[in-house]
Amino acid sequence: MPHIDFAVGIGGAAGQGVATPGNILAKLFARRGLHVNAYNAYQSIIRGGHTFLTIRTSERPVRCLGDDLAMLIPLNQDTMDRHLERMRAGSAVLYDGDRVKPGAAAEGVQLCPLPLAQLARNLLYYNTAAVAAVLRLVGVELKPFEEMLAQQFERKGDAVVAENVTAARAGYDYAGAHFKPYAFSLPDTGKRLAVATGNESLAMGGVAAGVKFYCAYPMSPSTGVLMWMARHARQLGIMVRQVEDEIGVMNMVIGAAHTGCRAMCATSGAVLP
């Protein structure tokens, strides 16, 4: 069997939910025993700036992201205009045909317009339909995704779960009827793997190093460290404080360190006025 190396690029405006389909795909790939490497590149803008998430998966460990993409999912026109020229023969571009229009693509690039408004009645379920279409093109069955949706939306009630599953099935069936699948199918190695973000790994490293005081001001991309620490603080015996700004954070961390407490903070590195 040839070596599988599949990379997806998902782009849109900051605040448009680029990370959501990426997180779902990463979990689905890992549950098939596939290794995953993902990176989210975004501007220092709360809303509106271009964000681009790359996720690469393989049955072998993925050491880098590389430059080639097998699939592009542009959530807005800007992403289509920026990245379409990167796509080569054998790749596919999956997009909302009602809101995004393709330009001139290289020969052999499959353009896959999805009528998302028709497939998912609620805007909130557009990503669900799009992810299902991806799964159909790479030969992955829908059932694991349906199970994930049931787990993810269980607290919101049966109606929300049912609407997401309906959108997933619609996207999956539409892709199967209108688009050409890849020449390969993503394998299932039979060994489920875990997915850990860089922020989670950093937080766990701090715990292993004996951190007992964590202080932060929430700002991407470091917010995940604060959220992990706060979620596990009581269990691990760590004092966690959210402060009004980064200067206050540093003052508290330095003060805690002077008392002999092992202290830690993380921030985004943004330029302050």
Image (cartoon, helix red, strand yellow):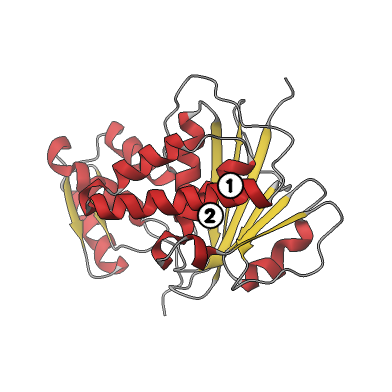
Residue 7's x, y, as percent? 65, 43
The answer to whether residue 146 is above or below residue 111 is: above
Residue located beneath label 2 in the image:
130
* Camera-nearest residue between 255 and 218: 218
In percent of the image, x 43 and y 43: which residue is there? 197
Disc 2 is placed on an element classified as: helix
Q: Is residue 201 left or right of residue 172?
A: left
In percent of the image, x 71 and y 40: which residue is there? 182
In percent of the image, x 79 and y 45: which residue is there? 90
The answer to whether residue 157 is above or below residue 37 is: below
**Residue most extreme to the right:** 107
> Which corner quadrant holds the N terminus?
top right
* Camera-nearest residue between 8 and 255: 8
Residue located beneath label 1 in the image:
134
Residue 130's x, y, as percent? 53, 54
Pointers 2 and 1 in contact (CB under 8 A)? Answer: yes
The amino acid on which the numbered mark 1 sits, given as a three-letter code, is Val
